[in-house]
Amino acid sequence: MALHEMMNYSQLFLEIFNELQQIEDRGRVADYIPELAHINPDHFGVHLTTIDGRQYAFGDSEVRFSIQSIAKVFTFVLAYSRVKSNIWERMDMEPAGTPFNSLIQLEYDRGIPRNPFINAGSMVVCDILADQLASPRENVLAFIRSLSRNSTVDYNPIVAHSEKRSGFRNYALVNLMKSFGNIRNEIDKVMDLYFSICSLEMSCRELSESFLFLANNGIVPHSGESILSPSRTKRTNALMQTCGFYDEAGQFTFKVGLPGKSGVGGGIVAVHPGKYAIAVWSPRLNKKGNSYKGMLFLEEFTTRTKLSIF
Ligand code: GLN
């Protein structure tokens, strides 16, 4: 079904939501970051924005939540658009096939992460931004505020602190990379930026609007601002397709069929190049750390509308 033929996505969202209510949610809220364990697991929101400006929402679409690893796309895009050096000498472009915080490959690959969307890769991106930008924390925030057209989007220092205190595995990753010479700045500087970006809070509406340039050849539809070249936009979408869901990227491609990115706050954003960006939020996670019902919802959505890229 073509996008314009769809009468009312909000109605379809309601139908899919009601059907999913019949299914037991076998997911669990992320509690390895203590501050995230407090969230009400029954939240559910979805927001779709088309490149010609139409908006369809359902449920808690305006409620902000911890975007966690979804932020890895923003920092990667910022580095990819600003940095002149070859960032692919510092990280690869291959699906990891391992959990987002796995240490195994880093040892074999001598401190080169498999891609920018696992924790290690995003830490290298943070290290690059720390080198290139005068005030990386402020610059990243300004970038996301401008993409979301909302100057109140912010870091949550309580979540960042909670993650820092419990981030033993993340410190292991960054130390291992530092031992191989692939982290140039002081570890605390890199990790303060990393934990800050993970703590960003945004709503489904803000996420779907912020990702819209990836569905539009790198150009923000409403302003005409160019964020990335068409070629780099294609590559960013390719990375989301192959690496956006850790060791479940194949399954997401198989079932949903869109480039996207998830976070352990229960959010998923996906884009359909040339058409739309959609964000869904449901906090309970499956074993791979992706939103249990968020994945099911998107699978139903792209199956019923035939709006996947495949
Ligand atoms: N902040 C989380 C971590 O580093 C991000 C992981 C995720 O969202 N998959 O563990």
Image: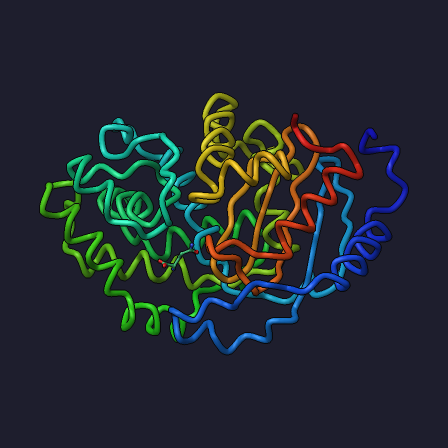
Ligand 1 quarter of the rendering: bottom left
- Coloured how? rainbow
Where in the figure is residue 290, as x and y percent of width and height?
A: 52, 53
Tell me the quarter of the image containing the N terminus.
top right
The correct choice, above or below, for 48 with respect to 197 in the image is above
Q: Nearer the viewer, residue 249 or 2?
A: 249
The correct choice, above or below, for 137 with respect to 248 in the image is below
Quarter occupied by residue 260: top right
The correct choice, above or below, for 76 with respect to 268 in the image is above
- Apparent side of residue 178 relative to residue 33 in the rendered image (left or right): left
Q: Nearer the viewer, residue 254 or 208?
A: 254
**Which residue is found at the position 50% from the left and 78% from the top?**
38
Tell me the quarter of the image containing the C terminus.
top right
- Apparent side of residue 89 relative to residue 241 in the rendered image (left or right): left
Where in the figure is residue 13, as x and y percent of width and height?
A: 79, 53
**Which residue is found at the position 58% from the left and 66% from the top?**
64
